[in-house]
Amino acid sequence: MAGDGIDDLIAMKSVLKLARKKYLSFLARFSKRYRNRVFRESLVERLATSDADLAKWEEQYKRNVQKLSYDLDKLSWDISITNLQLHTFTLGLSTSLVASAIERLERLDQIALCLARVSPIMDKNDWWLVAGLPITFYEHIVQKQDSVTAEEITKIIVKFFNHEKAKKLGQIVESWNAAPFTLREQFFDEALWAHQNARFNLSVSVLIGQVEGLIRDFVATKYAFTHRSFYRVRGVFSSRFKVLTELLTENTATVEEVNAIVNYHNLKKLDELYDAYDPSSHHKSERLRRHAVAHGLSLNYGTVELSTRLFLLLDMLHSMVKQIELQK
């Protein structure tokens, strides 16, 4: 009995193994078919989606091509119109260019003649040709030369350069880039601060001593000349400029003539700054004299006018230094 039971169990186990094997084989075939079906269905779906996307892309492409074609056509039209307009403008320009050039040259000739004529008038009224003033100012001076006064000219100049807390003077100081000037930048900045804050005794005291130093440094560097007498040094400096006291012809002025006339009056103003002085009278003088200030004899130089004059005189000196530097 016991042996028969064991045999039955072994036989049952074999049957179960076979059944399990058959079942697994069946499941494998089903799983494979299922996976294949799922893959096919997914592929078809993706293809369908791709076809839809491709159709959309083609439609968008067509629209882009149409828009690009339209834009290119429009651009071509715009270019054609622009070329036509440019051609028309060029034709108009060619007909007016000569007339415009003639007008400009005539205006330049008028300005040159004005500057040549106004220089001696400014000198007569204790000034020089100040850079930065509008040409209309000088034209007015020439027209009114018989009635204009030194006081009127001074008032206009001082007001012009001290507007908005001496903004224009600040721009002038900032523009000084010649070598002797850059070495003294701190002095100029402090003098400008003093001027802008109405400390004119300070600004004048600082600036008036720099004129000699600037000229000495420039002459020593440029011409290797130095001398204890500043008069001799100024002589070397002055000799480098072409000068002219008046126009060679009455109604025309070349650029060279204008520069020579301006140089003459500029050098004259520099010399006047170092005029000999009488110690007994300089404490009453209202004119700018280096010796009177440096020796403590002038006590009334702390004014906006004299401080402004010194800044403008230094600017004139700077332009003269640059003129020499640009000479061949």
Image (cartoon, grey):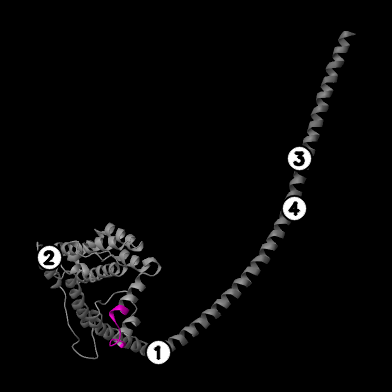
Q: CA distance from mark 3 to mark 1?
A: 91 Å
Mark seen at residue 230: 2
| Discs 3/1, front | 1
Disc 4 target residue: 45
Name the dominant secondary structure of the magenta segment: loop
N-terminal of the pair, mark 3 or mark 4, is 3
Sort mark 2 into few (<14), some (14-19) or many (20+) by Cα contacts within 10 Å: some
Residue 36 in the image: x percent, y percent? 75, 44
Q: Type of residue at label 4?
A: Glu
Q: In the rendered image, is residue 328 in sight?
A: no
Residue at 28% x, 57% y: name it: 186
Query: Along the line of sight, which residue is nearer the eye, 198 or 262?
Result: 198
Q: Is residue 31 above or below residue 296?
A: above
Residue 218 in the image: x percent, y percent? 17, 64
Q: Type of residue at label 2?
A: Phe
Sort mark 4 into few (<14), some (14-19) or many (20+) by Cα contacts within 10 Å: few
Disc 1 target residue: 96
| Discs 2/3, front | 2
Q: In the rendered image, is residue 81 in sight?
A: yes
**Residue 17 forms part of the magenta stretch:** no
Q: Which residues are magenta?
A: 143-152
- Res 177 quadrant in image: bottom left
Residue at 85% x, 16% y: name it: 9
Disc 3, disc 4: CB below 8 Å? Answer: no
Secondary structure under badge 3? helix
N-terminal of the pair, mark 1 or mark 2, is 1
**Residue 149 forms part of the magenta stretch:** yes
Q: CA distance from mark 2 to mark 4?
A: 103 Å
